[in-house]
Amino acid sequence: MVSLSVVVSAYNEEKKLATCLSSVSWADDIIVIDNASTDNTSEVAKRFTNKIFKRPNHTMLNINKNYGFTKANGAWILNIDADEDVPSELHKEIIETINNTERSINGYYIPRKNIIFGTWIQHTGWYPDYQLRLFRRGSGTFPEKHIHEKIELSGKTAYLQNHLVHTNYETVSQFIDKLNRYTDNEAENVVGSGHRFDPVDLMRFPNGEFLRRYFAQEGYKDGLNGLTLSLLMGFYHLTVAAKVWEKNHFKESDKAFDIFEREWLRVVTDTEYWLEKTNKKHQRNMIIRLVHKIKNTLTH
């Protein structure tokens, strides 16, 4: 049998960690990285493993995940977070896969089932949400550049069928708390990529994200959850744009209203297009009337 190590990075996860670790208790090796937790995370971890490593709580959390990979002994590594768990179907598929996989394949993407506000979000960009989490030891690592980066792998990859369960945002407050930390890193990466701030970003970033989530990724099929999450993700990207503006010392522009007028009309036109594609004829006709009303107001 091929050996498997599970690496879990956790910060103040005493409430969820036991569910996570019990779902992988079958693994040959469990490594828990405690990111300077102030609760009972380490005590919970001790019920499942003696390989617990306390580390500073880096903003770039993937530093500690990479550290955990170096402590693994298994031929394969499964990397999960403390708010994720492995159902029995996925457990069986993983064991069968690593014992029968081709030599040329070094990693596997796993679909992830995100539970947000107590509901499985099946659209809005949150499913199947493939994550590269299973890989041969020594073949994968995080770049440690971006908070939402993926594992970089040497070699070929394939896909598993059964999903990982992610108990994602449980409250709006939790979303907002993480938003503030994550957007700091996002803004730094936007600036670091060479992007020059343009005032239009303040509308184009959030508007584009909302339309992508709600229409292109069919968030409307997730009901009120899909609408709320699409709006929240739009706000997330507005915050990124605003923090990039902050890094430009809040430089003023005398074209703010012109930008608002142009971009708002663009959003309305794009929304009309998407309503057409989704066959929401009643809403489409309403939007057309609204477009004409806005145009008449702004041009007279």
Image (spheres, grey):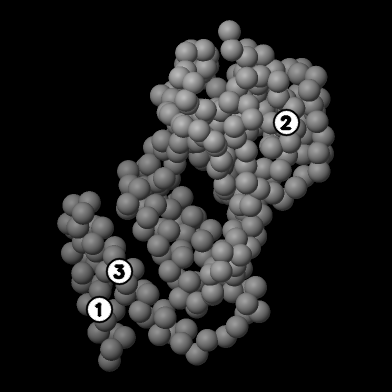
CB under 8 Å between discs 3 and 2? no
Quarter of the rendering occupied by the N terminus: top right
Q: Quote the CA–CA distance across marks 1 and 3.
A: 12 Å
Front residue of this view, candidates 130 and 268: 130
Q: Which mark is residue 70?
A: 2
- Which of the two discs, 1 and 3, sits closer to the camera? 3
Residue 231, position in %: x, y?
A: 45, 57
The circle on residue 266 is none
- Residue corresponding to mark 1: 293
Q: Is residue 206 left or right of residue 35?
A: left
Identify the mark nearer the N-term, 1 or 3: 3
Image-quadrant location for residue 136:
top right
217 up-or-down from 38: above or below: below
Label 3 environment density (alpha carbons within 10 Å; few <14, some 14–19, many ≥20): some
The image position of residue 116, as x and y in percent, is 50, 39
The residue indicated by pointer 3 is 268
Residue 254 position (above or below residue 272): below
- Say if 213 sits above or below 107 in the image: below
Regarding mark 3 in the picture, which secondary structure is present there? Answer: helix
Kind of residue at disc 1: Lys
